[in-house]
Image (cartoon, coloured by chain):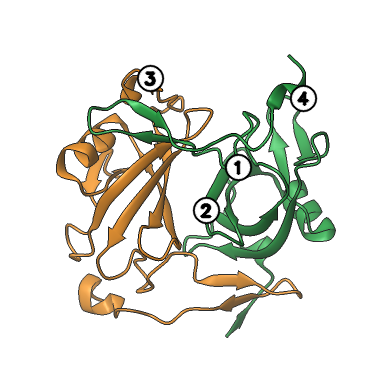
Chain colours: A orange, B green
Amino acid sequence: MTEPRFLDQIKWTADGLVPAIVQDAETNAVLMLAWMDRDAVVRTLETGQTHFYSRSRRSSWHKGGTSGHVQHVREIRLDCDADVLLILARQVGGACHEGYRSCFFRRVEADGSLQVIAERVFRPEAIYGG
Amino acid sequence: MTEPRFLDQIKWTADGLVPAIVQDAETNAVLMLAWMDRDAVVRTLETGQTHFYSRSRRSSWHKGGTSGHVQHVREIRLDCDADVLLILARQVGGACHEGYRSCFFRRVEADGSLQVIAERVFRPEAIYGG
């Protein structure tokens, strides 16, 4: 069952963006959520590495371009409403700028507090300074 | 390492919403992404079942309230920027209103077309009419 090209099916927000969930293709851990514009989706398809949209710079950027922590895309899925992407990728290093493999490194406890449940895989200051 | 109550840490959008990724606690499959307002987060915490925000009805709603396909929350995580929730849940039936277990039942092929990669787990017309 084949449908038309998916780029033309994506339902973008009013700002021309679509949220993209990145899932670790090896462990199935959810690594992060970021936004893509059409250019970021095209670059992701062309290069096989994730690109996202930066609101501050108003342009797409290459994830891992500075840190080397790129995401090699294995598979892209589109949801039923065509307004969310799921990207299965092989993550080099860590997805999170705070040094964790996944951005979801804090769990809500029964008392409503947050608990860090992961170990850092790199030192952020070694890459981003500070 | 314990931090203050997470509800007050969430960075809501200008509309007072936060995106929530729901992941199958048993298979680790990503099931869906939907939006929550503060009320939906509170109801999710109180009931142990996911609630989301409906833009058309401008109120929170109980996922599975009609279909019975509820999501029993196992764990909630918050990302580094405190603007995305990850909810690990036990899914009854299917998360997708089109009858699939996951809303991400279509894969982008090398030629840019979309391919359905899952089987339906229920007939949507049996629940939603049509």
Question: Left or right: A70 with respect to B113?
Answer: left
Q: How far separated are the C-alphas under marks 4 and 1?
A: 16 Å
Q: How far separated are the C-alphas under marks 1 and 2?
A: 9 Å
Q: Which residue is mark 2?
A: B29
Name the residue nearer the viewer: A116 or B22. Answer: B22
Name which of mark 4 and mark 1 comes first in the sequence. Answer: 1
Quarter in which the C terminus of chain A is drawn: bottom left
Which quadrant holds residue B86? bottom right
Q: Which residue is mark 1?
A: B101
Chain to which mark 1 belongs: B
Q: CB under 8 Å between callouts 1 and 2?
A: yes
Query: Number of marks in the image?
Result: 4
- Within-10-Å neighbours for mark 2: few <14, some 14–19, many 20+: some
Instruction: Check if mark 2 and mark 3 are on a common chain.
Output: no
Q: What is the x, y in percent for residue B77?
A: 59, 64
Q: Which residue is mark 4?
A: B126
Query: In this rendering, does residue B2 appear at all?
Result: yes
Q: How far separated are the C-alphas under marks 4 and 3?
A: 25 Å
Give the SS element for disc 1. loop
As displayed, is residue B119 above or below residue B123? below
As displayed, is residue B84 above or below residue B74? above
Instruction: Check if mark 1 and mark 2 are on a common chain.
Output: yes
Q: CB under 8 Å between callouts 4 and 3?
A: no
Residue, x 76% and y 54% (percent of image)? B44
- What amino acid is found at the position of numbered circle 3 in the picture? Glu
Q: Which residue is mark 3?
A: A3
Q: What is the x, y in percent for residue A97?
A: 34, 66
Query: In this rendering, does residue A55 appear at all?
Result: no
Q: What is the x, y in percent for residue A100?
A: 38, 73
